[in-house]
């Protein structure tokens, strides 16, 4: 009996230790979402973890666009002019994953003091555009817009998107042409959804990453985003240059413009930013929003100088002088 307990206890303890290790590893890893893997056979369904949808709006997020396409390079100045002349506080919605969360905090500090902006957090950690079977960002966004009007939308996704996409029942591995097309459709749908309610959209690219393989993936995502933003006429704000050192390499410490003193800009994972880092990448966005609204604002009305008629008494006096 003692020998049996000895051999039974050892694997049990090992299994318990392994389980504890997995739990700790998941909790310590940033934005962990289980990757999409191909099914074991053609007949077996792809594994998926379905989260309860935020709203029950019947929104199709498959291969075809769910909303009418926005013409390429639309003139957003008309909408900016409407916002600039509205005379009300503008709702700035920040959408994204954990990186978007940090951008919201930075924009809140930068824009909220103007009293002309209400900066709203619409981001959610551990989300992305690859895994709509985990959190359907399209449906979530539709529900958020039904709850409140957004005038200006700022997007930053991609921290969790270097994995396969399940689209129309097919699995597209990360980086393939099918993946790029499916990812691009989801980006287009989000932009068009915001535009349908009259919002002006800004989309931020991913920063420089510490790990070379992850940085290569981020560069691929940035290329897809830049291509689609150009086609949609959306302002795309790259962040690689402002998160790289003078040699174009990753560095956790970077100097502010005009200063030689370096500050900690990145988190320990080499993906996320410190608060100083989020302020650094969000500053250009805040500047663009202010610039675009100022450029679209109607010119100030200059009151015309009134023309006064000559005094009647003076006219009489002048007439009397003319006839002695």
Image (cartoon, rainbow, N blue to C red):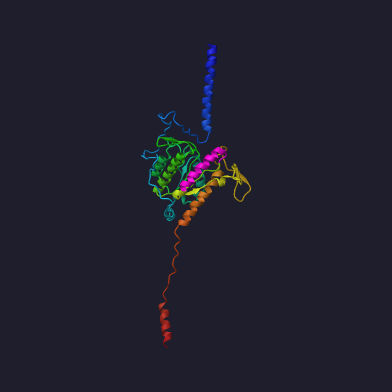
Which residue is more in the foreground, 115 or 86? 86
Q: Which residue, as the protein is rendered here, is positioned at the far bottom?
A: 324
Q: Which quarter of the rendering shows the C terminus?
A: bottom left
Q: Which residue, as the protein is rendered here, is positioned at the far left?
A: 58
**In x, y percent, where is residue 298?**
44, 59
Q: Give above or below for 93 relative to 173.
A: below
- Total of numbered circles in the picture? 0
Q: Which residue, as the protein is rendered here, is positioned at the far right?
A: 260
Q: Is residue 227 magenta?
A: yes
Q: Residue at x 42, y 35 (%)?
A: 170
Magenta: main secondary structure equals helix
Q: Give above or below for 21 relative to 210.
A: above
**Is 243 placed left or right of 304 in the picture?**
right
- Residue 112 visible from this viewpoint: no
**Is 244 placed left or right of 232 in the picture?**
right
Q: Which residue, as the protein is rendered here, is positioned at the far top?
A: 1
Q: Is residue 31 magenta?
A: no
Q: Residue at x 49, y 53 (%)?
A: 290
Q: Give above or below for 267 relative to 89.
A: above
- Residue 284 visible from this viewpoint: yes
| Span of residues in magenta | 209-229
**In x, y percent, where is residue 282?**
52, 47
Which residue is more in the foreground, 260 or 182? 182
**In x, y percent, where is residue 288?**
50, 52
Q: Residue at x 49, y 48 (%)?
A: 236
Which residue is more in the foreground, 204 or 312? 204
């Amino acid at each position: 009996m003692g020998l049996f307990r000895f051999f039974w206890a050892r694997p049990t303890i090992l299994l318990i230790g392994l389980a504890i290790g997995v739990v700790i590893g998941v909790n310590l890893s940033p934005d962990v979402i289980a990757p999409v893997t191909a099914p074991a056979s053609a007949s077996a369904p792809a594994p998926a973890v379905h989260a309860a949808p935020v709203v029950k709006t019947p929104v199709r997020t498959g291969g075809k666009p769910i909303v009418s396409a926005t013409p390429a390079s639309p003139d957003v100045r008309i909408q900016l002019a409407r916002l600039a002349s509205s005379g009300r506080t503008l709702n700035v919605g920040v959408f994204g994953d954990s990186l978007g969360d940090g951008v919201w905090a930075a924009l809140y500090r930068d824009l909220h003091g103007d009293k002309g902006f209400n900066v709203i957090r619409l981001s959610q950690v551990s989300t992305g555009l690859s895994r709509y079977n985990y959190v359907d960002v399209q449906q979530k966004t539709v529900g958020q817009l039904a709850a409140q009007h957004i005038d200006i939308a700022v997007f930053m996704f991609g921290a969790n998107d270097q994995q396969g996409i399940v689209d129309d029942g097919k699995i597209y591995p990360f980086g393939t042409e099918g993946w790029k097309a499916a990812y691009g459709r989801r980006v287009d749908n989000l932009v068009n959804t915001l535009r349908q309610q009259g919002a002006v959209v800004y989309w931020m690219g991913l920063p420089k990453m510490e790990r070379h393989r992850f940085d290569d993936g981020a560069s691929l995502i940035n290329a897809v985003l830049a291509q689609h933003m150009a086609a949609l006429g959306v302002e795309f704000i790259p962040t690689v240059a402002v998160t790289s050192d003078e040699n174009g390499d990753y560095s956790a410490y970077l100097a502010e413009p005009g200063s030689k003193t370096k500050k900690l800009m990145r988190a320990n994972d080499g993906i996320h930013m410190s608060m100083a880092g989020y302020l650094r990448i969000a500053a250009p966005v805040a500047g663009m929003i202010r610039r675009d609204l100022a450029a679209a604002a109607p010119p100030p009305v200059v009151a015309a100088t009134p023309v006064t008629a000559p005094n009647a008494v003076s006219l009489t006096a002048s007439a009397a002088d003319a006839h002695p």
